[in-house]
Image: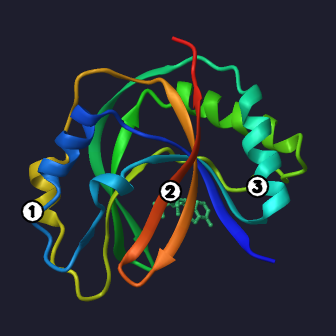
Amino acid sequence: MSTHRLFVALRPPPPVRALLLRAMHGISGARWQSDEQLHLTLRFIGEVDHHLAEDIAAVLGALHAPAARVRIAGVDLFERQGRPHMVWARIAPEEPLAALHRKVEQCLARVGIAAETRAFVPHVTLARLNRSSGPVAPFLALNGDLASDPFLFDHVTLYESEMGHGGSRYHPVARYPLVD
Ligand code: 2AM
């Protein structure tokens, strides 16, 4: 049976994506995210069958949570095995995002999705790096303090991820409004 690779995310509004996209250059060999790919994952679900995908889409309809007022608060690096692995944007404050993460987790528990064991680290991935990527220090020196005006995450999106050779494509499956 076919499966669906799902995740729940927040989509930055257009002016915030434009700010991020303007900053996204200056590391040779980096795989920069496209506008369509920019998001903040609240909960990665992974592969589920069609029936569970429908149950997840339905149960998220019960998500009654406040919209999160936040801002872009800098750009940073994740390392893996001592090498730069990913460039990402920080969103602050983190508490409203952590609260949303917990609410999504509670909804998913109702359809039998086991609680996540990894710590929730809110981030918007900007670029994926590999061994052949160029130095990141000049980019970080320029953008480490990248900041936006405050903005609102006013809905949550359930996405399906389709993995391909040119990177993943993310298809919105359903949107759930947050309360302003
Ligand atoms: P990333 O951008 O930090 O890699 C779709 O793949 C989204 O789910 C991405 O935001 C990705 O985070 C996240 N993701 C992918 N695999 C994951 C995993 N195993 N655990 C947590 N998040 C994951």
**Residue drawn at (9%, 65%) of the image:** 26
1 and 3 marks in contact (CB < 8 Å): no
Secondary structure beneath label 3: helix
Residue nearest the viewer, comparing 169 with 12: 169
Indicate the position of residue 52 as horizontal and vertical percent values.
83, 56
State left or right for residue 126 relative to residue 110: left
Quadrant containing ligand 1 reads bottom right
Amino acid type of the residue tagged 2 in the rendering: His
Residue ID for mark 3: 53
The answer to whether residue 131 is visible is: yes
Mark 2 C-beta closer than 8 Å to ligand 1: no
**Residue drawn at (40%, 69%) of the image:** 79
Amino acid type of the residue tagged 3 in the rendering: Ala
Which mark is nearer the camera, 1 or 2? 2
Within the image, what quadrant is residue 42 found in? top right
Residue ID for mark 1: 138
The answer to whether residue 145 is visible is: no
Residue nearest the viewer, comparing 86 with 173: 173
Mark 1 C-beta closer than 8 Å to ligand 1: no
Number of numbered callouts drawn:
3
Which mark is nearer the camera, 1 or 3? 3
Secondary structure beneath label 2: strand
1 and 2 marks in contact (CB < 8 Å): no
Amino acid type of the residue tagged 1 in the rendering: Pro
Indicate the position of residue 176 as horizontal and vertical percent values.
60, 30
What's the CA distance linking mark 1 and mark 2? 33 Å
Which tag, 1 or 3, sits closer to the chain's start?
Answer: 3
Q: How many neighbours does mark 3 have within 10 angstroms: few (below 14), some (14-19), or many (20 or more)?
A: many
Which tag, 3 or 2, sits closer to the chain's start?
Answer: 3
Mark linked to residue 171: 2
Residue nearest the viewer, comparing 50 with 79: 50
